[in-house]
Amino acid sequence: MAVRLATDVYGTLPQAPTRNGYGEGIVSAGKKNKDIVVLCADLTESTRALAFKQAFPDRFVEIGVAEQNMATVAAGMALMGKIPFITSYAVFSPGRNWEQIRTTICYNDVPVKIAGHHAGISVGPDGATHQALEDVAMMRALPNITVLVPCDAIEARKATLAAAETKGPVYLRFSREKSPVFTTEETPFAIGQAEIFRDGTDVTIVACGPLVHLALVAAKMLEKEGINAQVINNHSIKPIDKKALIKAARNTGAFVTVEEHQVTGGLGSAVAEAIADTWPVPIRRIGVQDRFGESGSSAELFEKYGITAKAVVKAARDVVKVRQLCSVLHAPPVESGGEPGKLLSEITPDQDFRLWGGETIHTVPELKEALKNMDDKTFHYHVNARKNDFSSWIDHCFGDRMLAEALRTHPTKEAMIALIALRLKEVKD
Amino acid sequence: MPAKKIDDEKQLKLIANQIRQDIITMLTAAGSGHSGGPLGMADVFTALYFTALKHDPKKPNWPERDVLILSNGHICPVRYAAMANAGYFDRKELLTLRKLGSRLQGHPHRAALPGLETSSGPLGSGLSQACGAALALRMDRKPNRVYCVTSDGEHDEGNTWEAVLFANKMRLTNLTVIIDRNNIQIDGHTEDVLPLEPLREKYESFGWHVIDVDGHDIRHIIDALGQRTEKPTCIIAHTTPGKGVSYMENDPEWHGKPPTPEQAQVALTELQHWRERIQAGED
């Protein structure tokens, strides 16, 4: 069951950048625990570390433009019992100080929290050098660390607080641009737990960060095409909620992932890994496709890099089609499954298929062509809740139980055309 | 109980000699590891573990302990040998160095052996961890002191100099860095690979209190470790890599390899002769 979100999720929502949630989160965490300290590498205002500096000047450390020093000073402070939040842009931290994070934070297993700001292409005009697109990959490869990508400013605050209370190292990813605030105080948030933000049965869209809202918008668009999409907010990239993802894979059988990161190594990869060994399903990964960003407005860049609701809709459509094909290929062999070779054979005139309009069909390739031009009325005369004439005809006259079964379980025109084409190709090969 | 501070110079020299013999024995048993650096730093580690440091070998996490961060992790055999001789663990365990399942990892790992404070090996990141520790202790108004051992070679790393700047900014008077100034690194002499001189002036201009010492004069080292000013302290310990084993001394060849069993016999015989001279009061 989907969790409760803001009342007007698809309407006009308040806008705020997730970095604001970081600022609020560190101040709340600082009030709760006096061991929390914040370090910043000369970006105090834009990362919202300023709020903490003003609230707790004695527990704020200005490091200067020295991200490697920031990570290692934090490690040293953590060794003495502090819980440091290190703050910079994600391209620099964890970008520049990765080895320091690896050895002195993750290998040491100390509670340093790495806040990577201005992540993704949405940073916009600053261009490629300042658009972190590999940070999640770099971080999630490390043992002992938790990786969180909150979806809006409210969740960003919750994630920051949760990070403060988690034992080991945590990586938190934040965005610069304003984005819809669509969760509420009551929306559940727990590390390692994916949340279903929309119920659906045909395809699962897994997203993280502000793009979760884009996924919801895409799901709404898909609804109009008769595709019922589930949306999962996968804020916890590591540990990943394997159980929830496998359950979704079993239920819908088709995935689309959406992220503002290289599709290699990020959310898409993490989701694929999570389900691959138990319940693999076809996946389309929306994100940055192995290239660098560039200058432009955030909206222009999303359009150019193919990270739009329209792109998600198309990917969902595609992946549903692939699932239908895959289900045939991977279907267990039907007992006495008939002889696929017969699919191309001639049948006697008394076995011809007579369509509702009067036209007759006497080969399977002809059926495929007929389906392409068939009006809905004719199609539903033959394929409806009570019967599937095409499936029965193939079974009885050509003895191909596997194709017959596939057509019966995928009773749409589009799917049937694809399935027949696939089966014919298989037989010819 | 906190470790007793040893004042007798002859006794300290004998301990340093034992540490050197242990280094040879453990490296030979391991079949890999670094020889030059550990032998060169035996006197500094003797001064640290037997006089300067406030610590308790039976309670490695004693909250009142002084913190010793080893930045150049590859010289860990000297730290392991010093810790074993100080009573942290049995000297027999030294023979497990670099072996599967050993607490004595090839480069030190904090989670493996209590008392190490941090994991290290990748160069240039120890001094900033020491800065962080010193800062955290000062925030909590604790008197513990932080010592950090670094190599001269790792001053090639930018991260080291970021920390040198930072310690000055934060006025970390509770911090002492000891630089193993042995003039060698893997590819040769430091002044050929990437010149560091004038090292003393560099630190001074960065706002540190700098003391040059003979890294094999234990009395001198102890004096330097005890100095306190209104600045962070830097001790440049001039050492001879491979000190005590004549065929290893000052030879970059011996930076990163252990002796063979035959070479180890020669080394141990030499070290034993040195020991006898110390006992006879001739050294």
Image (cartoon, coloured by chain):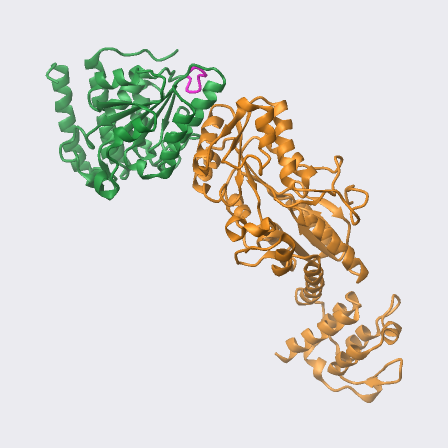
Chain colours: A orange, B green
Q: In which quarter of the image is residue A162?
A: top right
Towards the viewer: B166 or A339: B166
B102 vs A391: above or below: above
The quadrant in which the N terminus of chain A is found is top right
Q: Where is residue B279 in the image (x, y as percent from the top left)?
A: 14, 15
Q: Where is residue A170 in the image (x, y as percent from the top left)?
A: 56, 36
On the question of residue B117 being in view, the answer is no
Q: Quadrant of the image for the C terminus of chain A?
A: bottom right
Q: Is residue B61 within the magenta segment?
A: yes
Residue B134 drawn at (x, y percent): 42, 22
Q: Nearer the viewer, residue A122 or A225?
A: A122
Q: Is A310 placed above or below A422 here?
A: above
Residue at the far bottom: name it. A349
Residue at horizontal 59%, vertical 26%? A54
Task: Between residue A379 and residue A16, name the one nearer to us.
Answer: A16
**For this view, does A111 lie left or right of residue A395?**
left
* Residue at image location 70% in from the left, 76% down from the top: A421
Asked which quadrant contains residue B245, the reply is: top left
Query: Would residue A218 be found to the left or right of residue A119 on screen?
Result: right
For image coordinates 89% across by 67% down, the residue present is A386
Whether residue B276 appears in this view of the structure is yes
Q: Nearer the viewer, residue B93 or B5?
A: B5
User: Residue B243: x, y in percent?
Assistant: 18, 29
The structure residue drawn at horizontal position 65% and vertical position 36%, both measured from the top left corner, is: A21
Give the prevailing secondary structure in the magenta stretch.
loop
Magenta-span inclusion, residue A344: no
**Picture mark count:** 0
On the picture, is A295 further left or further right than B38?
right
Which residues make up the magenta segment? B59-64
